[in-house]
Image: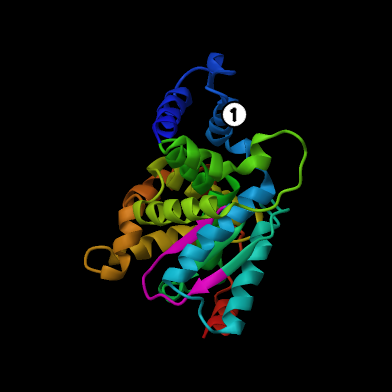
């Protein structure tokens, strides 16, 4: 037991130390894998895409566990159609994008690494056009393409014990032997689930949310949608925020809608007097009513 405690303490020091400590051992235990693991966690590019997708699957399961998917195949198919249109204009078209409506009356939307995007039934009820839906989905897609949640989970894991770090990246990510990905270990999966619960309750950094807003405008514009529709969504949120309990989590985890609208107003696309993007209100009504 003393050796285990010593190992964790020494490893924790190494995680915050310089790379010159590589090769250090405690007894017969080589700490190089711990150092390597911490470096990989500090850089999201080191997480392979299959591992990212697996991490996202566990985070998505946390969301679906809190609020199951809406049992309406037509609505789910339509959501995936709009989502896939947007994903084809994203910077990560190779991800196996999956979209779902959560049976939850709260007004919100979520994403998880690897291409998982969810919108609540409550948020769907606020929307009036396909362009507005595209804006909400594009915001979440931007979180995925910029790896915001993945980086946040990695950052949190850096504060944990060395054993958790080793579990989270798994042996195949530590080694550079080219071995096949076999999935997260049980302990690592539990770590990810716990981290995701904390993350969704706490929210991402304000800068990440504003960056995803910018990305949403660029993405929906590239896909041919009217970017003003996303401003309309934020204005609806702004109008409801004072007394709506269903907005509580969204307002806790995001900057105020007023601040988001102000930040977006600086984008060049909104300096134009007219936009040629699609709104598609009728198609939205036909597929969601």
182 left or right, relative to 42: right
Q: Seen from this angle, which residue lies furthest left?
A: 243
Location of residue 88 with respect to 286 vertically, above or below: above
Q: Quadrant where the N terminus lies?
A: top left
Choose between 194 and 262: the one closer to the eye. 194
Q: Position of residue 255 (x, y in %)?
A: 34, 49
Q: At x 31% / y 57%, what residue is drawn?
A: 251
Residue at the limit of the structure toward the top, as seen here: 20
159 to the left or right of 97: left
User: Residue 62, relative to residue 101: is it above or below?
Assistant: above
* Relative image position of residue 15 (x, y in whole percent): 47, 27
The color scheme shown is rainbow
Q: Is residue 165 magenta?
A: no
Residue 106 is covered by the magenta coloring: yes
Within the image, what quadrant is residue 121 found in?
bottom left
| Quadrant of res 10 | top left
Q: Indicate the secondary structure of the residue bearing disc 1.
A: helix
Rendered residue at 76%/35% (across/down): 177
Residue situated in front as seen by the camera: 51 or 239: 51
The crowding category of the residue bearing disc 1, from other C-alpha atoms within 10 Å (few below 14, some 14 to 19, many at least 20), is: some
- The magenta-colored residue range is 100-114
Q: Is residue 98 left or right of residue 230?
A: right
The residue indicated by pointer 1 is: 36
Location of residue 58 in the rendering, given as x and y in whole percent from the top left corner:
54, 59
């Amino acid at each position: 037991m003393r050796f285990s405690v010593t190992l964790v303490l020494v490893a924790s020091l190494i995680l915050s130390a310089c790379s010159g400590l590589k090769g250090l051992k405690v007894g017969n235990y080589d700490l190089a894998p711990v150092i390597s693991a911490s470096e990989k966690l500090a850089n999201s590019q080191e997480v392979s895409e299959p591992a990212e997708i697996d991490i996202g699957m566990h985070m998505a399961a946390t969301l679906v566990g809190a609020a199951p998917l809406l049992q309406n195949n037509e609505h789910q198919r339509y959501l995936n159609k709009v989502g896939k249109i947007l994903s084809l204009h994203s910077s990560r078209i190779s991800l196996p994008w999956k979209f779902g409506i959560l049976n939850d009356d709260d007004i919100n939307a979520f994403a998880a690494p690897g291409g998982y995007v969810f919108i609540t039934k409550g948020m769907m009820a606020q929307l009036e056009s396909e362009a507005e839906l595209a804006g909400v989905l594009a915001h979440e897609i931007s979180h995925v393409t910029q790896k915001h949640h993945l980086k946040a989970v990695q950052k949190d894991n850096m504060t944990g014990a060395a054993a958790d770090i080793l579990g989270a990246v798994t042996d195949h990510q530590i080694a550079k032997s080219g071995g096949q990905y076999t999935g997260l270990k049980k302990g690592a999966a539990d770590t990810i689930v716990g981290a995701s619960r904390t993350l969704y309750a706490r929210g991402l950094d304000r800068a990440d949310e504003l960056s995803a807003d910018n990305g949403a405008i660029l993405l929906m514009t590239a896909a041919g949608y009217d970017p003003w529709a996303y401003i309309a969504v934020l204005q609806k949120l702004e109008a409801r925020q004072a007394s709506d309990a269903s907005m509580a989590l969204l307002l806790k985890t995001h900057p105020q809608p007023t601040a988001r609208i102000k930040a977006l107003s600086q984008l060049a696309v909104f300096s134009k007097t007219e936009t040629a993007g699609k709104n598609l209100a009728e198609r939205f009504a036909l597929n969601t009513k």
